[in-house]
C-alpha cells in the first residue's frame, strides 16, 4: 500500500510541476505579445464607432456621459460602476453604454444590445467600444465610490451573489475565487476576496483572449463564470451583473488599471 501511495504522490507532484511549467510558458507568451496586443485593433475600431453618427437620430456617442461629464473618457472606467442621477440607478460601463445608444442615438433596447459579444462571422460593436473606453483609464488607479445609498446597496447585493451557492453543482463565484493558489487545469484562479487578487484580476479586463480571437468584456467574463456554475445565462446589462461588477470593482480599489490586457 505504501508503494501505491508513494507512486500516487509522485504522479501528483509531477502533474503539479507540469502545470506550473505550462503556466510559466503562458506567462512568457503573454510577455512576448505585450507590445503588440491585438486588443489595440479593437480599440481603434471602438474609437471609430464612438465618433460615428448612427441610429435613427444620426448622432455619435461623443456626448455620452460615463460619469465625468459628456464625452469625458479619461479615467471614467476607473470610477465605474457608479450612481447616475439621470437614471437613478447604479450602472456599469456596458449598462451605461447601452443607455447612451438608446437615449442619444435613438436605438431600441433590443437594437442596443442585439450583438453584445463577437463570434465567428458576427462582429460586435459593443466589445470594440468597451475596449476603446477602458483604454482611456490605463495607468489610472481604480477609485469606485460607495457614498450613495444605491452604491452601497449594489455592493451588498453583488457580495451576496458572489457567495451564493446554487445550480446542479452547488457552486458559487467564491467556490473558485476565495482562496490562494487555486487552479483549474492550467488556469490560475485569483483570490477575489483578497485585495491583491481582486486588483490583479479586475484591472486586466476587458481582455483579448488568444483562445477565442476576440476581446471579451467583463460582462462576458461573468457570463462564463455563471455558465461554469451551471447557472442560467444572465440578461445582458442586467442589474444583477452590475451588482457583481460593483462588488469586484470596489474590491479592486487602489489597483492601477492595465486593460485591455491579454489572456490565454
Image (cartoon, rainbow, N blue to C red):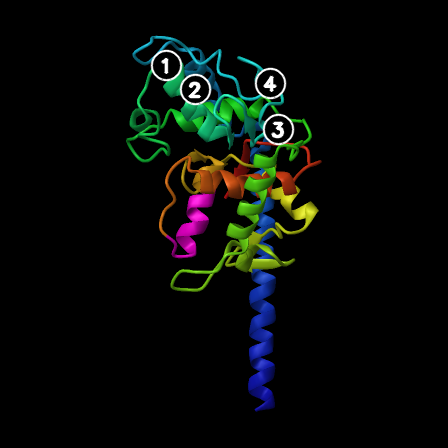
Predominant secondary structure, magenta span: helix
Nearer to us in this view, 4 or 150? 150
For marks 2 and 3, the one nearer the N-term is: 3
For mark 2, what is the residue? Answer: 100
The label on residue 79 is 3
The label on residue 105 is 1
Magenta-drawn segment = 221-231
Q: Of helix, strand and loop, which one carries label 3?
A: helix
CB under 8 Å between discs 1 and 3:
no
Q: CA distance from mark 1 to mark 2?
A: 7 Å
Residue 227 as seen in the image, left or right of residue 191: left
CB under 8 Å between discs 4 and 2:
no
Disc 1 packing (10 Å; few <14; some 14–19; many ≥20): some
For the point 32% across and 30% down, the residue is 115
Residue 140: name its quadrant.
Answer: top right
Tag count in the figure? 4
CB under 8 Å between discs 4 and 3:
yes
Quadrant for the N terminus, please.
bottom right
Q: Position of residue 253 (x, y in %)?
A: 68, 37
For mark 4, what is the residue? Answer: 68
Amino acid at each position: 500500500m505504501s508503494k501505491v501511495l508513494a507512486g500516487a504522490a509522485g504522479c501528483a507532484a509531477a502533474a503539479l510541476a507540469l502545470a506550473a511549467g505550462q503556466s510559466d510558458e503562458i506567462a512568457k507568451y503573454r510577455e512576448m505579445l505585450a507590445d503588440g496586443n491585438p486588443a489595440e485593433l479593437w480599440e481603434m475600431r471602438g474609437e471609430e464607432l464612438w465618433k460615428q453618427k448612427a441610429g435613427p437620430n444620426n448622432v455619435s456617442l461623443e456626448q455620452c456621459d460615463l460619469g465625468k461629464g459628456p464625452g469625458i473618457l479619461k479615467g471614467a472606467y476607473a470610477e465605474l460602476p457608479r450612481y447616475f442621477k439621470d437614471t437613478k440607478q447604479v450602472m456599469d460601463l456596458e449598462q451605461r453604454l447601452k443607455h447612451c445608444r438608446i437615449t442619444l442615438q435613438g436605438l431600441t433596447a433590443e437594437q442596443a444590445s442585439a450583438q453584445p459579444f463577437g463570434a465567428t462571422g458576427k462582429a460586435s460593436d459593443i466589445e470594440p467600444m468597451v475596449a476603446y473606453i477602458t483604454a482611456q483609464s490605463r495607468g489610472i488607479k481604480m477609485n469606485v465610490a460607495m457614498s450613495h445609498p444605491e452604491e452601497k446597496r449594489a455592493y451588498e447585493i453583488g457580495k451576496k451573489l458572489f457567495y451564493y451557492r446554487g445550480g446542479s453543482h452547488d457552486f458559487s463565484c467564491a467556490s473558485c475565487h476565495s482562496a490562494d493558489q487555486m487552479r483549474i487545469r492550467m488556469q490560475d484562479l485569483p483570490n477575489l476576496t483578497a485585495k491583491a487578487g481582486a486588483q490583479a484580476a479586475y484591472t486586466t479586463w476587458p481582455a483579448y483572449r488568444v483562445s477565442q480571437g476576440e476581446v471579451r468584456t467583463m460582462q462576458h467574463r461573468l457570463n462564463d463564470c455563471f455558465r461554469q456554475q451551471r447557472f442560467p445565462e444572465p440578461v445582458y446589462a442586467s442589474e444583477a451583473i452590475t451588482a457583481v461588477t460593483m462588488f469586484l470593482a470596489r474590491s479592486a480599489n487602489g489597483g492601477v488599471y492595465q486593460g485591455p490586457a491579454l489572456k490565454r
